[in-house]
Amino acid sequence: MNNEQLAINKSHTACLHRVSHLLVANCFLLLFSLCACNDVKSDNDLEKSPFVCRATTGNPHFDLLDIQENGELIILTLYGPESYFEFRGEHFGIQFMIARQYAKSIGAGVRVEVARNQQDLIRKLTDGEGDIIACQLPCADSLTTRFEFVGEAEITAFMDSLSRQRSDTTLRARPHAAWAVRKDSPLLSASLAQWMKAHQKDFFAYTTIRVKSGGGRTYTPRRRVSAPILNAAKGQISLYDDLFKQYALQCGWDWRLLAAQAYQESAFDPQAVSYMGAMGLMQLMPGTARQVGVASSDVFNPTCNVRGATKLITQLNMHYAAIANTDERINFILAAYNAGPGHVDDARALARKYGKNPDVWLGNVDAYVLKMSAPAYYNQPEVAHGYFRGSETYDYVNSIRARWNQYKQKIKR
C-alpha cells in the first residue's frame, strides 16, 4: 500500500470516528429530549448573563484522546493583535502561537475558528464547534458550571511581562481572564493546565518569530540600511538595478517603481529578515516564497527573491484586473503585497458599503484600510479576514509612491 492510499485510509478513519461521535451525540440528545419534554425549566439568573448561550447544534464534544486520534485541535478565538490575525497569508497572534505549540505537544495540528464577539465565542465552545477558547476570556461565575478556566496565572504573568518588554500597554493581561475548556473534556483541561505550568517560561520563545532558510539555519529579525540612491549622477539607484530592470519587464512595471518597493521592504539588504518573518530583498514570507516557486535555500538570493516578487506582483495584477486605470491598480497591488489581498478586499467591501468607490485608493479605499485595526470595523460581516495594521499598509503605499516620484525625477528610465 503506497503513502497516498495510507493517507486516504487515515482520513476515512478520522471521518468515520467523527461521524460515530455525532450519531451517538444525536441519539443521546433525542433520548434526553423525550425524557425531559414535560420538565422544561429556566434559570432566570443565568438567562440574564451576557455570557450564557444555550447549546443548539448537537455537535459531539471531544476530549483529549479524540483530538489526538483525529490529529486536529480546534481553537476558538477572536480577531485582534494579541489573539489572532492574518498577515500575507500567514497566521499570527500571541495567544494563537501559544495554542499552536500546545497542539504540537499532543501530536495534533491546529485549526482556527474565529468568533465575531464574546457571546458567539462562548456559544461555539458550548456547542462543540471547537475544543478550547484560546484567548483571554473573563472568568465569569455564570460559566463555571460548564467551563474549566485554564492558565489564568500563566497568561497574566506572560502578557504583563511582554507588555513591559515591548513598552506596549495594549498587551497587558485582562484582569481575571483565562482560556476555557468544556467541563466534559476533563483530560484536555488537565493536559492544557499541566502544559501551561510546565512551559510558561517558553512562551517568549513560542511567540518570537524566527525563520529558517535552506540547511535549517535559523534567522532572527535583522536589516542593514543603505542609502535610497546609490549614485544619482550615474543614474544608479542600487547595486541591484540590473535585476529590477530585468524583472520589471516581466510584470509590466517601471523598474524604478520596483526599486522603490525594494527599498521600502529591505532598504536594499538582501539578507534582511523582518519581525514578521519576511525575508530577502523583496521580503517574501515563507508561504509566499513557496507559492511563487522560491526554495527556502534561495530566498536570500537577490535574483530568486526579485523573480519571486515579480511573480507575486503579476498574480496581484490579475487579481485586480477589473480596476481599469493601471496607475490606480498599482496602489491596490502595493497594498495587497504588504497586507495580503484578503485584507485589501475587505477594505474595498467596506468602502462599497459606505458609498465610496472600491476601485479608487486615495480618499476611498485607503480610508477604510486605516480603520481595519478597530474592532468596530474588522468585526463587521463584510470583513472576511479580520484585523490588520492598516496604518502600516497606508504608509507603505504612500511611501513607495513618493519614493518612485523622486526616482523618476532623478534617474532616467
Image (cartoon, grey):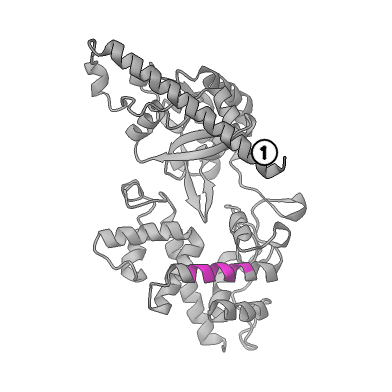
Residue 334 showing in the rendered view: yes
Query: Residue 111 or 364: which is nearer the viewer?
Result: 111
Badge 1 amino acid: Leu
Residue 9, given in percent of the width and then of the height, sits at: 62, 36
Helix, strand or loop for disc 1: helix
Residue 40, relative to residue 274: is it above or below?
Answer: above
Q: Is residue 50 left or right of residue 413?
A: left
Query: Residue 380 or 314: which is nearer the viewer?
Result: 314
Residue 300, relative to residue 21: is it above or below?
Answer: below
What residue is at 47 percent from the left and 63 percent from the top?
Answer: 336
Q: Which residue is mark 1?
A: 6
Residue 89, given in percent of the width and then of the height, sits at: 52, 54
Residue 118, given in percent of the width and then of the height, sits at: 35, 34
* Quarter of the image with the N terminus in it: top right
Instruction: Give the class, few, some or many, for how many residues have Cα within 10 Å of label 1's Cα (few <14, many ≥20).
Output: few
What residue is at 30 percent from the left and 10 percent from the top?
Answer: 35
Q: Which residues are the magenta region? A: 308-317
